[in-house]
Amino acid sequence: MTQRFLSAGLGLARHIDRGTSLLGRAVAWLTLLMVLLTCAVVLLRYGFSIGATATQEVILYAHSLVFLGAAAWALQRDAHVRVDIFYRRMGNRGKALIDLLGSLLFLLPMCLFLAWNCWDYVAMSWQRQERSADAGGLAWVYVHKSFILLLVASLLLQGLAQVLKTLAVLGGVSSTHLPTSHEEHL
């Protein structure tokens, strides 16, 4: 692999990282919305004996977006779960090799498998314009199910960025593929 190809790949990876970070930061703010809406639902139910089915479903949708939308951000920030028996003792090249193999053998195939298996599920929901089964619920269940595709797309892109960054480390263009700091503020 040429230095030029690896440098171009790093540029693409940086753009993907920016998009992933933007998505992750945006959905992280939904946790504040979830807290506020949950307080409102509790107040309405126990203070005024009023049900709020649609609001409860908005909380559910926000919860889904937080986890499915921020998964790639966790991967980008190296905040994902890893069986860390040997990894922490390795140097940057060893870590890059482990992460490259993990991405190629596990992450990307899992994303493709998930995309293949959920596409019809989401498409059928859109075709039917699926609505909530609860009285007073939201009419956008098909949008909610589409969040699975957001997970797949964001993880595929971040997996590609991970592969490009690890190849740059293995090719000697970059010293590390890992973020410089795990401390990031919203």
Image (cartoon, rainbow, N blue to C red):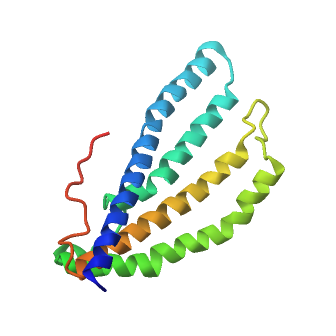
Q: Quadrant of residue 181?
A: bottom left
Give the farthest residue toward the bottom.
1
Closest to the observer, 14 or 184: 14
Q: Is residue 68 left or right of residue 25?
A: right
Q: In this view, does 171 lie above or below 128?
A: below
Closest to the observer, 166 or 80: 166
Which residue occupies 80% across, 46% down? Answer: 129
- Give x and y (percent) for residue 171: 24, 82
Closest to the observer, 136 or 164: 164
> In what quadrant of the picture does the N terminus appear?
bottom left
Give the farthest residue toward the top.
48
> In what quadrant of the picture does the C terminus appear?
top left
- Give x and y (percent) for residue 134: 77, 37
- Give x and y (percent) for residue 78: 31, 62
Q: Is residue 19 above or below residue 27?
A: below
Which residue occupies 55% across, 22% down? Answer: 40
Number of numbered labels in the structure image = 0
- Give x and y (percent) for residue 123: 75, 58
